[in-house]
Amino acid sequence: MRPIDWFTQALAVAVALAAAPLFLGWVNQCRAWLQNRRAASLWQPYLGLRKLLHKDPVIAREASPLFRAAPYVVFAAMLAAAAVIPSMGTRLPMGAAADAIVLVGLFATARVFLALAAMDVGTPFGTLGARREMMVGFLAEPALLMVVFVASLISATTALPVISEHLALRPLELSPSLAFTGVAFTMVLLAENARIPIDNPATHLELTMIHEAMVLEYSGRHLALMEFAASLKLLNYACIGFALFLPWGSATGRSGPLALALALPALGAKLALAGAALATIETVSAKLRVFRAPEFLATAFLLAVLGMLVHLLLGD
Amino acid sequence: MTLALWLLLGSPVVGAATFAMLGARPRAAELNVAFSLVTFAAAAALSVRVATRGAMSAGGEQFFVDPLNVFLVTLTAFVALTTSLFSRPYMRIETADRRMTPGRLRLYHCMYQLFIATMLLALTTNNLGLMWVAMEAATLSTVLLVALYRTPASLAAGWKYFVLCGVGIAQALFGTVLLYIAAERALGASGASALLWTHLDAVKSQLEPRVLSIAFVFLLVGYGTKVGLVPLHNWLADAHAEGPTPISAVLSGLLLNVAIYAVMRCKVLAEGALHSAWPSAMLMGFGLLTVVVASFSLWRQQDIKRLFAYSSIEHMGVISFAFGMGGPVANFAGLLHMTVHSLTKSAIFFAAGHAAQKSGSQLMDRIRGLVTISPSVGWGLMIGALAILGVPPFGVFASEFLILTTAMRTEPWATPILLISFAVAFAAILQRVQPMVFGETRLRRLPHSPALLPVFTHLLIVLMLGLFIPPFLADWYRAAAQLLGGG
Amino acid sequence: MIPPLVMQLLDSLAALLLLLSFAMLAQRRIVTLVDLFALQGAVLCAATLLLAWRTGEVNLYLSAALTLSVKVIALPRLLHAMIRRLGVYWDTDPLLNISGTMLVGVPIVVFAFGLAQPISALASTATRSAIGIAIAVILLAFLTMITRRKAMSQVIGFLSMENGLFFGAMCASYGMPMIVELGVALDVLVAMLVLGVFFFQIREQFDSLDLDRLESRREAP
């Protein structure tokens, strides 16, 4: 490993930590503009985090140690995922050890702890949110795996950095299978990050919420970590999407500091676009009833499977 | 002599156009007979030509006539003629009973001629694609006839008929596409000539076997739906029971034959390409299954036309089994069975139609004592039933006997299955027909005089074929049997 | 030889056909089902045109014109008119729920690909890899037919099957002989007209196009 690779690795983690709340702020801003509202500042998520960090956490009497530990575990899982995803350069020292399936596993770990913590205190909302979260996760995970598999089939590996490099370096072509899986991935992203057709991040209406219901009992620094983890998760998903479907612009192969210097603005541009697109999707679509969520995710899974079948058949 | 061919195909088309334009006229039924007569004359002329000078083709090879199809053409034209003779008085009674209106009569005559035209086209075309088009058109022209009375049951039957045959025929189209792909490869030519059966037959041993095997499965399923092979037979009984009787007679007597003909044409190609007998084995298997299922289903029937529709399914199974065995004797027997079955079954439907009219119901429990009400209908039904059950001197006995003896020699395992099914069918039909003909009745003789000339003409020919097959007919069967190959 | 970009376009159109088949499988609104069918016809027409342009086969131009006039314009119009006059807008509760149908659809596509192997091995056309998609479209249309209750959606399934057949013929051998294609198109058109008449008769009798009701009436004495 060259020193620059370690530098890329450190930079990726640092950028992820810095950019995650900013990305969330950007999405919220776009959404506000699209809905003809006056937007909050781009730095609003940071301010929110700072405020929460200054508060003392209040913990229910019945809470077990798991409840306290969960925010740290969830946050750590998301940070580890951020280290593995090739957001700017594909030569990541840690990326070699962890491939796409490990990535899905990290997300699953975070989800399990989140759900356990939500049920820990025993309030009805926490349990309800956890149940729904597990249902969504149970349906979204196979779809996500299938998306990754299609990309793996194309590049004959499950290591995300290698997949990304392969896709970036091959000649540009129209690929129906990648188009299908791209749509499937977007649907999984929406579902996993509690975005609009499945969940509404801005609501506290009891009957419809999923993610918010789970973190209802948290306060202070615990809540700050949970929210930070959520924004990291969104960023992670966006970066996985870039690695698979928009791999151009990131530093590939044995390229030097110049490519890395170019990769940073490229990532910024991609994030800006993705945030605007996400806000648009959320604005134009209506939230589905919880009972329709399986159908939504089944469609995502189907699209991913179709992508795979089309790839196998047409051999593109 | 191509004139005869054009006349054969043109007469029913012109007939259909005439009825469509003229509408319901008092003499429409006579006109229907006249068109059918012209068709039959053309068919007869064509068969004489083929018998004396062998196979011929016309229209840039798009049409061709050989002993196999000219025999079916003649049979089709003949039964179409006698059915038109039967339908004249039958429809008069239906009109008197207010079941037919002038509008429906117009549709009936028009579609009747169109149906005959499509069947003749399917038989005489050399292009397997056109054959498909004609088979689909045959379905379409009869859908509205099956639902002619517009009762809920008849509409349901028509819908079932359309959907099942439509799906089936779509499978056949796929099979045809596959055949075309294989043909393009073997013939090295594309375009219209690649689906000509005579060309394909010449190069059949070079057709890609795997593609042909898939194609044959699709074609067998597709056209087999029309033949009424189990498990694709569901539409048949409903369509026969709910349509007007002349349509039941031509569906059973003619359309099923044409469908079998289509299957056989494809089987010849598939077997030539595969160098193995599994297409025959499949045909045999489906045939045997059909015989067994149909003969046991006979016991459950309440409706006289459904009863004989199931009997048709059974006989189609017998014919498929015979052609599946292949070889000169079994093919001969299969062809003979096609002939006698279509003659006998249409005769039975004629008699059954009159019987139902006289008792005002198609339910067998309500039909009683036909001999008292109308001796000729009663005896016609009784003799017809005996003939179709294979009672000796009739032709069905001869063909079934030949099929059974061949089966004993080449496929001994199938013989007991066939024998048991025949026995079951015999008991089922006879126990139903006997009270209908000889039972007690309170009905009086009705004023309408039945049209029984066609019934007895058919039965007489069947009787004759059982006692003595004229040498020219035997030669003809032999030539056709040779074309079918196998064995 | 067909340049790679055109090949990729053709492949994408094929994939789109498959996607539309699944969309039809899932669609409950009959009006939308007709639109999807028209869209499928349009994609088929575009693929045919593209292939005609690259291969220079006159037959394919005619076939594309046939597809456009019959399947994109005439039939959807006819179907829309029928839907309006008959008032059938929804085909709720299919025999199998939507997700279940989709899950059955996936193995069907796999089966279709398996079936296509020997055929594509034989075909000499550049588009032979899409034969599997054509077979999948046919089988999925068949699935649409058998899982629906309304006569109207079954008919649309039937027509979609025809689309798959045409696409298959196009991929495998640049289209069937013209005379056959004309005959098939004519048959389909006549079938729709016959069905139009038929639907109104059913409607008169049952006040509904629900096939279950048709069946139950038949069984009642």
Image (tube, grey):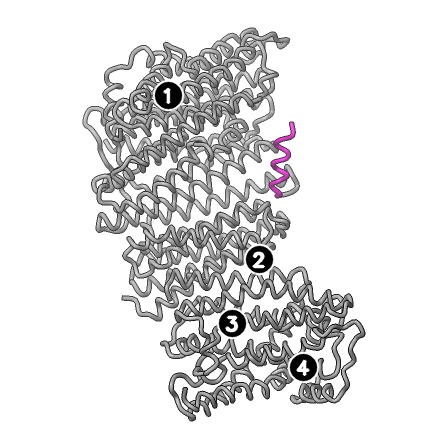
Q: Give the numbered dot on residue B415.
A: 1
Could you tell me which residue is drawn at 38 percent across and 42 percent down?
A: B218
* Quarter of image, res C68: bottom left
| Residue type, label 2 | Thr
Label whose residue precedes the other's in the sequence (4 or 3) = 3
Residue contact between numbered discs 3 and 1, judged by CB atoms under 8 Å: no
Could you tell me which residue is drawn at 46 percent across and 35 percent down?
A: B232
| Residue type, label 1 | Thr
Do badges 1 and 4 share one subunit? no
Question: In this picture, which residue range is highlighted in magenta?
Answer: C209-221
Examine the structure image and report whether residue B93 is included in the region drawn in magenta: no
State the CA–CA distance, disc 4 to disc 2: 46 Å
Outermost residue on the right side: it is: A61
The percent coordinates of residue B285 (x first, y second) are 38, 31
Q: Give the numbered dot on residue A102.
A: 3
Report the mark closest to the observer, 4 or 2.
4
The chain holding disc 1 is B
Q: Which residue is mark 4?
A: A225
Q: Is residue A234 among what the camera can see? A: no
Mark 2 packing: few (<14 Cα in 10 Å), some, or many (20+)? some
Report the mark closest to the observer, 1 or 2.
1
Find numbered disc 4 in the image and state the secondary structure of the residue it sits on: helix
